[in-house]
Amino acid sequence: MSTRDWLKFTLLGVIWGSSFLWIKIGLREVGPLTLVTYRAASAALGLGIFLLLNRRLNLRWSHLLPFLILGVVNAAVPFALITWAELTITSGMASILNSTSPLWVILLGPLFLADEKVTWARTAGLLLGFAGVVVLMMRSLNGAVSPLPGVAAMLVATFCYALGAIFIRKNKAELSTEMRVFGQFSTAALVMLPAAALFEPPFEIPALPLTWTALLWLGLLGSALASILYFDLIKSAGPTRALLVTYIFPLVGVILGAIFLQESVSINLVIGGAMILAGIWIVNQGLPFGLAKKELS
């Protein structure tokens, strides 16, 4: 990846890596579907204002289907599943399971994308990175078995993310990244609002400033800005490499905990973090002995 891609990759990891914490905070006052509605609506509103002020809002009927697919597959469904899952599993476990997205792309990518080959380097890097995530969070797992519904919801959510990443790369619609993200979250908000009103009545308006901070962070930064960075990264680096950012999430969470919550930095952090970074490097730079581009047979 280029230097610009690495900068986007790092910023995206920091923003999205903190989202699991903000979801936990938001869930203290509102339900999961309501939280996702606020998140999608604030993202769409923020982007809509930006596009209007810059005279770049350009909507056509032909955009409706791509917007709907992205809104449902890449936002509404996975957001709702992840938020619901965090009612029963820890944010650390959620971030671990979120890291399975690249593995889904490894399985699905070759079926739809000519440039997504299953190579030794990608397989080794992805497996090493995922093992690093498990090592990193092993201290918080303590051998406990997480509730199966929450785990299953996370796995379905990451499957949706993989499908969304492949669709973004494959769909060559002549739209700016900002317009794609605006369309995605506009349709996601329209889908989630009736769902929240139906399954979580009455529709809750938060009273605590911290809850509003969480919702606005998740919408404006964790959704709008992060999705712009993510879409750009998929176009320039491909879905497999872009989704490797999910391996940064637990690392970010542990570092933030150490800085702001005085949590101890264990050997798990050192070893797991090194494995994560090594996995990312292998996927991007390849393996020695000529295995970087050799496909699995």
Image (cartoon, rainbow, N blue to C red):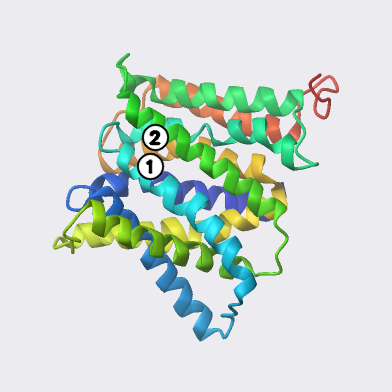
Q: Whole-percent x and y of residue 46?
A: 42, 72
**Location of residue 30 with respect to 185 vertically, above or below:** above
Residue 248 can be seen in this image:
no
Residue at image position (45%, 20%) is 135
Q: What's under tag 1, amino acid-wise?
A: Leu
Please identify the quadrant where the C terminus is shown: top right
First along the sequence among labels 2 and 1: 1
Horizontal arrangement in the rendering, residue 36 relative to residue 1 (left or right)? left
- Real-space Cα distance between discs 2 and 1? 5 Å
Q: Secondary structure at mark 1?
A: helix
**Location of residue 145 with respect to 206 vertically, above or below:** above
Q: Whole-percent x and y of residue 274?
A: 54, 27
Q: Secondary structure at mark 2?
A: helix
The numbered disc on residue 284 is: none
Residue at image position (45%, 79%) is 49
Counting other residues with Cα less than 10 Å from the Cα at mark 2, is it few (<14), some (14-19), or many (20 or more)?
Answer: many
Q: Residue furthest top?
A: 143
Residue at image position (40%, 29%) is 152
Counting other residues with Cα less than 10 Å from the Cα at mark 1, is it few (<14), some (14-19), or many (20 or more)?
Answer: many
Residue 176 can be seen in this image:
yes
Q: Residue 293 appears in which quarter of the rendering? A: top right
Q: Whole-percent x and y of residue 178?
A: 57, 69
Residue with the mark numbered 2: 153
Residue at image position (61%, 65%) is 177
Q: Residue 148 appears in which quarter of the rendering? A: top left
The numbered disc on residue 81 is: 1
Q: What's under tag 2, amino acid-wise?
A: Ala
Q: Nearer the viewer, residue 294 or 107?
A: 107
Q: Residue furthest left?
A: 207
